C-alpha cells in the first residue's frame, strides 16, 4: 500500500513564497485542506488569517513562517514526523 506524505498538515500556518500570489497572499495563512497530488506536487487549500480568503496552492508555493513574521517555527524543515 502506498502512503502519501504531505509536507504540511491541516491547521498548520504557512506563508506564500510564489510571486504568483504577491498581490493577494501577503501574511500568514492556515492550511485548511489537503488536496490531491497534481502532477508531481501536492496541493493545499489555505486561508488568509486576516481576511479568511481561501486559495489553492502547490507545496512549492508555501513555507513555514519564521519568527520575524510573527509565527515561530521550531525547525527549518517543514516536514513533520508521523
Image (spheres, rainbow, N blue to C red):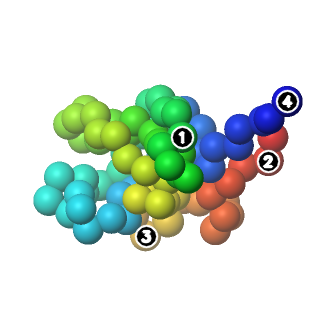
Residue beneath disc 4:
1
Marks 3/1: CA–CA distance: 31 Å
User: In the structure shown, which secondary structural element does the residue marked by tag 1 occupy?
Assistant: strand
Which numbered disc, 3 or 1, marks the residue closer to the eye? 1
Decide if residue 78 is on the left or right side of residue 1.
left
Element type at marker 2? loop
Residue 74 as seen in the image, left or right of residue 55: right
Circle number at residue 37: 1
Judged from the image, the secondary structure of the residue bearing numbered disc 4 is loop
* Residue drawn at 59 percent across, 38 percent down: 9
The quadrant holding residue 68 is bottom left
Of badges 1 and 2, nearer the viewer stands 1
Query: Whole-percent x and y of residue 49?
Result: 31, 40
User: Of tags 2 and 3, which is closer to the observer?
Assistant: 2
Q: Earlier in the sequence, mark 2 or mark 3?
A: 3
| Residue that label 2 marks | 81
Tell me the CA gap for discs 1 and 2: 20 Å
Q: CA distance from mark 2 to mark 3?
A: 24 Å
Q: Give whichever of discs 1 and 2 has the lower sequence position.
A: 1
Foreground mark, 4 or 2? 4
Residue drawn 66% across the image and 64% down it: 77
Q: Is residue 71 above or below residue 6?
A: below
Tell which circle, 4 or 1, labels the residue nearer the N-terminal end: 4
Q: Nearer the viewer, mark 3 or mark 4?
A: 4
- In the structure shown, which secondary structural element does the residue marked by tag 3 occupy? helix
Residue 72 location (% of width, % of height) = 54, 59
**Residue 38 percent across, percent down from the top left:** 48, 43
Q: What residue appears at the point 56 percent right and 53 percent down from the top-left corner?
A: 40
Q: Quadrant of residue 27?
A: bottom left
Question: Disc 3 marks which residue?
Answer: 68
Among the two numbered marks 4 and 2 on one chain, the one whose residue lies closer to the N terminus: 4
Amino acid at each position: 500500500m502506498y502512503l502519501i506524505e504531505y509536507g504540511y498538515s491541516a491547521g498548520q500556518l504557512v506563508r506564500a513564497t510564489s510571486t504568483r500570489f504577491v498581490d493577494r497572499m501577503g501574511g500568514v495563512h492556515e492550511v485548511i485542506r489537503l488536496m490531491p497530488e497534481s502532477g508531481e506536487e501536492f496541493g493545499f487549500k489555505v486561508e488568509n488569517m486576516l481576511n479568511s480568503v481561501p486559495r489553492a496552492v502547490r507545496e512549492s508555493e508555501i513555507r513555514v513562517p519564521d519568527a520575524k513574521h510573527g509565527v515561530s517555527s521550531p525547525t527549518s524543515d517543514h516536514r513533520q514526523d508521523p
